[in-house]
Amino acid sequence: MKAVLDTCVIYPTVMREMLLGAAELGHFTPIWSARILEEWARAARKLGPEGEAQARAEIALTQSHWPKAERPPAPGLEQRLWLPDSADIHVLATAVAASADTIVTLNAKDFPKNILAEEDLTRHDPDSLLHTFWQTDPEGLTTIATRVLAEANRLSGTQWTLRALMKKARLPRLGKALTT
């Protein structure tokens, strides 16, 4: 399965690490565009001047780890597409140009399923998608989650529990599955 990752699921670190961890396990092939990555860097500015610099470093690492994930825009494609929020058309265009199967986003209202279906695409929220992967590969997802938890604890100096971290990362269903 080829999945375009919207900025809103890449920018939160824990969510991104869980999704890309699942991709490393072979559950899907991640796809994004240069514009999606640029939106990540711009969104990180809200953290202050060091936020954007850190995001750009993480983007560079992500690009080096996933060199085939970035897809160029297809000329003229955006002009024929429509979404409720025109600022999201580039995500749909990336999915169409890459012959993706799905768009992973938290933004359901701006990616209506009927419009995506016209382009042979589906939409998944990251929690449901990761939970589905957990159902078929609980050991693999648990390993990824344990690694993400250790890094979150190291970076924050806090002792998160797995379930609390996943809940904070907007992955409550996965967090519950991982801890039951």
Image: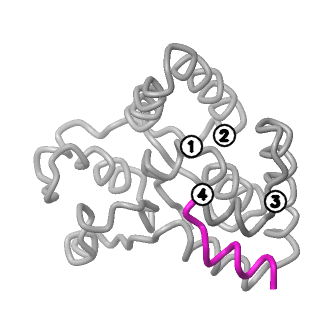
Q: Read off the residue under disc 2.
A: 66
Do residues under tags 1 and 4 come within 8 Å of each other at their CB atoms? Answer: no
Which residue is painted at 78% across and 62% down in the image?
Answer: 25
State how far apart marks 4 and 3 are (Cα).
14 Å
Query: Mark 4: which amino acid?
Result: Ala
* Circle count: 4
Q: Identify the mark at residue 56; answer none if there is no mark.
A: none
Query: Residue 61: where, in percent of width, then height?
Result: 69, 28
Q: Which residues are magenta?
A: 169-180
* Dot 4: element: loop
State how far apart marks 3 and 1 are (Cα).
20 Å
Q: Read off the residue under disc 3.
A: 144
Do residues under tags 1 and 2 come within 8 Å of each other at their CB atoms? Answer: yes
Q: Read off the residue under disc 1.
A: 69
Query: Mark 3: which amino acid?
Result: Ile
Query: Residue 164: where, in percent of width, then height?
Result: 70, 64
**Foreground: disc 4 or disc 3:** 4
Which residue is painted at 60% across and 67% down in the image?
Answer: 171
* Disc nearer the start of the sequence (3/1): 1
Work out whether 77 lies above or below 172.
Answer: above
Which residue is painted at 39% across and 33% down in the image?
Answer: 39
**Foreground: disc 4 or disc 2:** 4
Q: Identify the mark at residue 169; answer none if there is no mark.
A: 4
Query: Residue 99: where, in percent of width, then height?
Result: 41, 59
State how far apart marks 1 and 2 are (Cα).
5 Å
Query: Mark 2: which amino acid?
Result: Trp
Image quarter of residue 127 = bottom right
* Disc nearer the start of the sequence (3/2): 2
Please check the rendered image and state whether residue 176 is part of the magenta-colored stretch, yes or no.
yes
